[in-house]
Image (tube, helix red, strand yellow):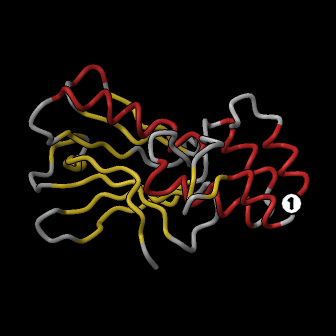
Amino acid sequence: MEAHVLLSYRAGLMVRVGKKVQADTRKGLIQVVRLDEDPPHVIRFRWTDRSATRVEVERVLAPSEARFSLVKEVGRIFALKYTDAAQETILFWMQEPSATGDDQFLNQITPLLKCGYSTIDYDSWMKGSWFRSIADNEEARVRQLLALGADVNRQRLGVNGLQYAIYHGHAHLVRLLLEQPNID
């Protein structure tokens, strides 16, 4: 059960005390991960106590099930908010020394929550998914990866996606890849 970390950012948890919310003073880490056995598109949103290195909050999320946004009225506080209003909103306070990375983190987490994939993270995850989808003859998945900006010319061990589709005998994927305007 290997966890592939797609994104991480230092942040503390906000806790409810009566009708108020206050910062949990522990050092924490938000991570968006994918486990090998997770279905496609599913991600896990985690909050870990950095001093104890244990996951204390974990939400398994399908695409567009939640969004992460700045709570504008109160500085560097962010909310993980479910599209289903019945689910609890979880608040976090950013612990990175500088706020300059907050926007970048928000820009990276948004596509992960929206569709389960990030166009930023080819090397650690998408590259494997691209070739796996071609090998497994998953046309719909290949089309989705192309729509997310997959590099049709990316190579693994000197072989690109087109060559991979030919090798596996997936003629419809060969045609699909040849239709791409930027194929070499």
Residue 25 placement (x, y as % from top left): 9, 51
Task: State the residue at coordinates (31%, 35%).
Answer: 78
Residue 31 placement (x, y as % from top left): 34, 55
Task: State the residue at coordinates (49%, 69%).
Answer: 35
Task: From the viewer's side, name the closer residue of 159 and 165.
Answer: 159
Residue 182 versus residue 1 in the image, above or below? above
- Quadrant where the C terminus is found in the figure: top right
Determine whether the residue tagged by mark 1 lies in a helix, strand or loop: loop
- Quadrant housing residue 105: top left
**Residue type highlighted by circle 1:** His
- Quickly name the residue at label 1: 170
Task: From the viewer's side, name the closer residue of 13 and 111.
Answer: 111
Q: Residues within 10 Å of mark 1 (few under 14, many from 20)?
A: some
Residue 127 versus residue 85 in the image, above or below? below
Residue 149 placement (x, y as % from top left): 60, 36
Task: State the residue at coordinates (42%, 40%).
Answer: 109
Residue 74 versus residue 60 in the image, above or below? above
**116 displayed left or right of 21:** right
Task: From the viewer's side, name the closer residue of 179 and 120.
Answer: 179
